[in-house]
Amino acid sequence: MYGAAGALLTLAVDYVFYRDPFFLPFLAPLGAAVPCIMKRRLKKQRQEKLGSQFKDAIMALSSALQTGYSAENAWREAWQEMICIYGEQALITRELEYMVKAISVNETPEQVVTEFAGRSGLPEIESFAQVFCLAKRSSGDLVAIIDSTARTISEKLRVREEIVTLTTAKQLEETIMSLIPAGIILYLNFAFDGFLEVLYTSMAGRGIMTVCLIIYAAAVALGWSMVRSEKW
């Protein structure tokens, strides 16, 4: 799907800036980059969703431990609660189901939590896995340690959710602003027939359009990096 979108983007850029099929091969890398960019974007969205759901899962785990469940059974209780909240097909539900089944075939909770942290790629889950493993192996108060860690990580994930919510509006603004220059060129072409014809028929005009395209692409890339920074 995104490959097709990349192909349409290549055709659109060629139409706006050149109107000549000769330039399509040179613009092909632009369209080929779309699937790669969207792959990273979708991965980040899935991680954000998993992090939001994990926040509720660790609170459910902490509650189960406080009521007297063992670490093994506490994960099962957390799984059942996530089914009630998010359904059976949610990311966190499927992960917890896999973990519960792994524990049922004699894998240790420490091992399955560590594997889950590696799959998620989220630093908060990796931190929780480290604390969980240390608390399980030590002689400390497992319930108190997990409860404190769960609350700390839950608060951190809540702050991240707020940041994502606040930046969503800025992302929409950046998308609209990125489309405006191309929209102006299209408007001039359709509203004033032949007004920009010299830019598409002469070598100097195509050189100017190439410079404009480079500046435009740099501006779009800069705007994308500012409002969609991986740091958030």
Image (cartoon, rainbow, N blue to C red):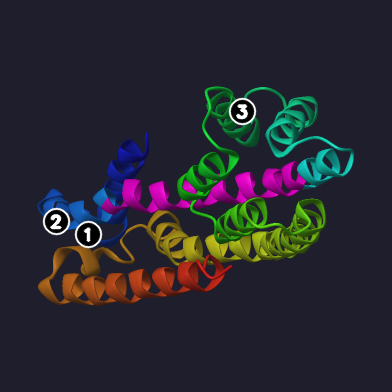
- Comparing marks 3 and 2, which lies closer to the viewer? 3
Circle nearer the viewer, 2 or 1: 2
Judge whether residue 186 is colored magenta: no
Are discs 3 and 2 less than 8 Å apart at CB? no
26 sits to left or right of 147: left
Res 197 visible:
yes
Split into 4 quadrants, where in the image is the C terminus?
A: bottom right
| Dot 3 or dot 1, earlier in sequence | 1
Q: Are marks 2 and 1 in contact (CB under 8 Å)?
A: yes
SS category of the residue bearing label 1: loop
Callout 2: few (<14), some (14-19), or many (20+) C-alpha neighbours within 10 Å?
A: some
Q: CA distance from mark 3 to mark 2?
A: 55 Å
Residue sitting nearer the eye, 224 or 64: 64
Quarter of the image where the N terminus is located = top left
| Residue lying at 32% horizontally and 42% vertically, measured from the top left | 8
Q: From which residue to which does the magenta span run?
A: 33-58
Instruction: Assign a secondary structure to mark 2.
Output: helix
Residue labelled with disc 3: 100
Q: Earlier in the sequence, mark 3 or mark 2?
A: 2
Q: Position of residue 9 (x, y in %)?
A: 33, 48
Residue depicted at x 32% and y 57%: 16
> Where does residue 7 sit, x and y in percent of width and height?
27, 42
Quarter of the image where one finds residue 53? top right
At label 2, which amino acid type do we have? Phe
- Provide the secondary structure element on which disc 3 rests: helix
Q: Is residue 27 left or right of residue 121?
A: left
Q: Main secondary structure of the magenta part?
A: helix
**Residue 56 lies in the magenta stretch:** yes
Which of pointers 2 and 1 lies earlier in the amino acid sequence? 1
